[in-house]
Every structure is written in structure tokens, then in C-alpha cells.
Amino acid sequence: MKRAQVIFEDGDHRWLAIARDPEKPDYIIDTNEYLIQNAGQSLLCDPGGMEIFPAVFSAISAEVDPATIETIFASHQDPDIISSLSLWLEFNPALKCYCSWMWSSFIPHFGGHPDTFVLMPDPGMDIALGGLMLKAIPAHYLHSAGCLNLYDPKAKALFSCDIGAALLPPDEQSLFVEDFDRHIRHAAGFHRRWMGSNEAKQAWCERVAAMDVDMLCPQHGAIYRGADVERFINWFAELKVGVLRES
């Protein structure tokens, strides 16, 4: 089963990673979910697919009262991001889901009604969590046409959805990148194919390079921290994306 691990804690502010499920079926891609807590309120970032809801809910409940989760952040519309929405709404019908305006009539196929959704504009927006302002950062076309990352300015953590993702072999179980050069081999093909715009990629790299980011936390694979954050940005900036096959 998945396990929730506290990665950052400072007073009444902390965030947790829900990751690494050795019991998940092999035909389902592994995902990382992230939960941010501040002043007793919780936000769940990219809560995952309906197939893994029991594992995610159980892992969170071992560390956090799930009743504190009042907000979901959906970086984009993929089923491995947000298809568990209806199950979360069964637990808390008053839950609010932040998503790009582009998906206002798409994500409701997974559940919810108009009052469930807070639609984010293309430039992003601030999201209040217990008095702290989290920031939705544009990441459009990386890979979704309507995609936003979530930045926690207190923890200096950027929750980057598919940016930074790596399709790791089963024996790579570390939650953090330990050897950048070895790790990035598992990310290269994914980024070449899944990231759709070199122009958008360059804009994202410039934007994030100017931010204060200690950890880059993708939805698949391992977390980049410290100097590996800059290494990833530089690597991504040089990578040609939107490529069907390597020449």
C-alpha cells in the first residue's frame, strides 16, 4: 500500500508525499500525490485515479484527518490526476476543486457540479490555504493544453505534475533523485514525447528558474531537490520536445 511521508514541516505548515505503492497492479502507472497542510487546513494536489483511491485515502488517514481536506488542486484533466474526484466528493460533498477553465466541462465527467469547481485563468492565481497563499503557475502544453503547477512559497516546493516525471524501473524505489545522470535517462523519452511545445517549455524554464524552488515534485518518479532542481531546469531547457521518435 501507499504510505504518506512528511517531507517538510515548519510550525503549523507541512506537506506530505503519498507515493510508492508496491501492491498496485502493473498495468497502472505509479503516481505521487501531495498533501499540503497549513493552520489546520489541507489541500490535496492531483489526488490520482479512482483505482488507487482506497490506497491514497488509507495512507492519508494514517497521518492526517481527511476531514481537514477542503480543497483539491487538479493540474490538468488526465484520469490519473483527477478521476477519483467523485469518491472524494462522496466523502466531502462540499469539497472545492481548482482546475483550468479549459476543463470546466471535461472534469465533471468524473463527478461534481458547477459549485464544485474554481476555474483558474491561464496566467494562474493565488489559492488561500489557512492564511497562506499558494500560487498556481502556468505550465500549458506541458503536457496538457490547460495545465498549471502549484507552488508552496513557504516550503519552496513546486508541484510540477508531469514536468520532471520519470518512468522508473521497479527496483528504483527512492522518493528522491539520488543520481541525476542515471535518473534522467528514465525521464528523457517521456519528456520528448509528452511535452508538446518547445516554446512553452522554454517559457516554463525561464519562469521557474527565476523562482525560489528547493524541491521539484513531479506526479511520477522521484523528487528533485537542491542542486538537482537547477540541473533539471537546464536539462529540460536544452531538450527538444514534441518528438514522435528519436532520430
Image (cartoon, grey):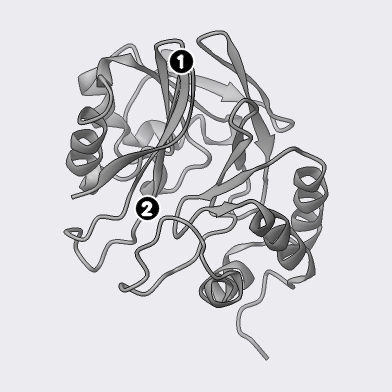
Residue type at numbered disc 1: Asp
Q: Is residue 85 above or below residue 242?
A: above
Q: Image quadrant of residue 23?
A: bottom left
Which circle, 2 or 1, is nearer the viewer?
A: 1
Mark 1, residues whose alpha carbon is within 10 Å: few (<14), some, or many (≥20)? Answer: few
- Residue at 37% from the left image edge and 75% from the top image edge: 169
Q: Is residue 156 left or right of residue 179?
A: right
Residue furthest to the bottom in view is 247
Q: Which residue is mark 2?
A: 31
Nearer to me, 128 or 40: 40
Q: How many marks?
A: 2
CA gap between label 2 and label 1 equals: 26 Å
The picture places residue 46, in percent across and down from the top left corner, at 43, 39
Among the two numbered marks 2 and 1 on one chain, the one whose residue lies closer to the N terminus: 1
Mark 2, residues whose alpha carbon is within 10 Å: few (<14), some, or many (≥20)? Answer: many
Nearer to me, 129 or 12: 12
The picture places residue 59, in percent across and down from the top left corner, at 23, 38
Q: Is residue 213 left or right of residue 27?
A: right
Q: Are marks 2 and 1 in contact (CB under 8 Å)?
A: no
Residue type at numbered disc 2: Thr
Nearer to me, 140 or 16: 16
The quarter in which the C terminus is drawn is bottom right
Q: Which residue is mark 1?
A: 12
Q: Secondary structure at mark 2?
A: loop
- Residue at 67% from the left image edge and 45% from the top image edge: 139
Q: Is residue 1 above or below residue 91?
A: below
Q: Is residue 92 left or right of residue 236?
A: left
Q: Is residue 45 above or below residue 78?
A: above
The picture places residue 76, in percent across and down from the top left corner, at 52, 42
Q: Secondary structure at mark 1?
A: loop
- Residue 149, numbered label: none
- Residue at 34% from the left image edge and 58% from the top image edge: 30
